[in-house]
Image: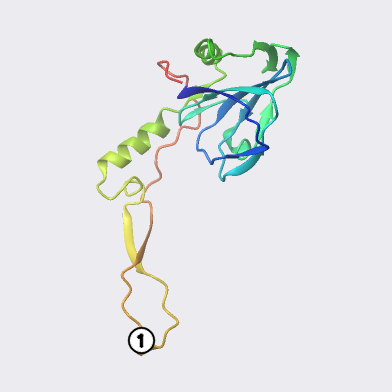
Amino acid sequence: MEKAWTSRSEPEPAFISVAVSRWHIVVATRRDVTQLTVRGPETTATVTPIPADAEFFGIVFRLGTFLPAMPLAGLVDRAVTLPAVTPNSVWFEGSRWEIPTPGNADVFVNRLVRQGLILRDPVSPSRFRTMSTASPNGPFSAAWPEQRALPAARSRRSPERRRPSRRSVTVGRPKTRPPCSATPTKPTSPGH
């Protein structure tokens, strides 16, 4: 778990939901009806309606954390609301789960981890951290070692009016692919 947040609806018709790289769980309560929604990463900002008189609670998960039952590729720019069993519980992976509150979010997440329903890929965050600190040329230079500079696109000006371009684009091919784990592993320590 990276962080948790709470919010109440404002008397506005909508808000701008910013693009985010992580997935999260959002609990919304309106008129004594509570829903638990799993929201995937968002590639663009979107205008989202604000329901009147609603309370929201969210759990944001760290990069590399995922639900095997809901692959992140299928959640990009989407959300899945879990079916309600009771006013305070939902059905997920063949079991009834109590909907978390701000006071027990850590207990909820730890239970999902113990059941193997939330896993963490230890390679993802450490790979980017290592690449960004190890290379003076930025985070991707370790993954793309054979780099060469290409000149920017040619100007449509006449040859005598063209000036040399100072811009260039870096492209390349990796010598080897970065290591990738095909089988998710259970985390060795908490921190989801």
User: Does 97 appear above or below 36?
Assistant: above
Residue at left offset 37%, top offset 38%: 128
User: Does 174 appear above or below 10?
Assistant: below
Coloring basis for residues: rainbow
Residue 6 spot, x, y in % from top left: 55, 22
- Is residue 142 at least partly visible in the picture? yes
Residue 156 spot, x, y in % from top left: 45, 82
User: In this view, which residue lies farthest toward the front?
Assistant: 11
What is the number of callouts on the image?
A: 1
Residue 7 spot, x, y in % from top left: 57, 24
Query: In the shown orientation, is residue 149 left or right of residue 1?
Result: left
User: Does 69 appear above or below 94?
Assistant: below
To which residue does mark 1 refer?
161
Q: Nearer the viewer, residue 184 or 9?
A: 9
User: Does 4 appear above or below 175?
Assistant: above
Residue at left offset 70%, top offset 30%: 51
Q: Nearer the viewer, residue 53 or 79?
A: 53
**Callout 1, which amino acid?**
Arg
Query: In the shown orientation, is residue 87 left or right of residue 111?
Result: right
Residue at left offset 32%, top offset 41%: 131
- Is residue 70 at least partly visible in the picture? no
Q: Nearer the viewer, residue 108 or 184?
A: 108
- Within the image, what quadrant is residue 168 found in? bottom left
Secondary structure at badge 1 equals helix
- Within the image, what quadrant is residue 164 found in? bottom left
Mark 1 neighbour class, 10 Å CA radius: few under 14, some 14 to 19, many 20 or more:
few
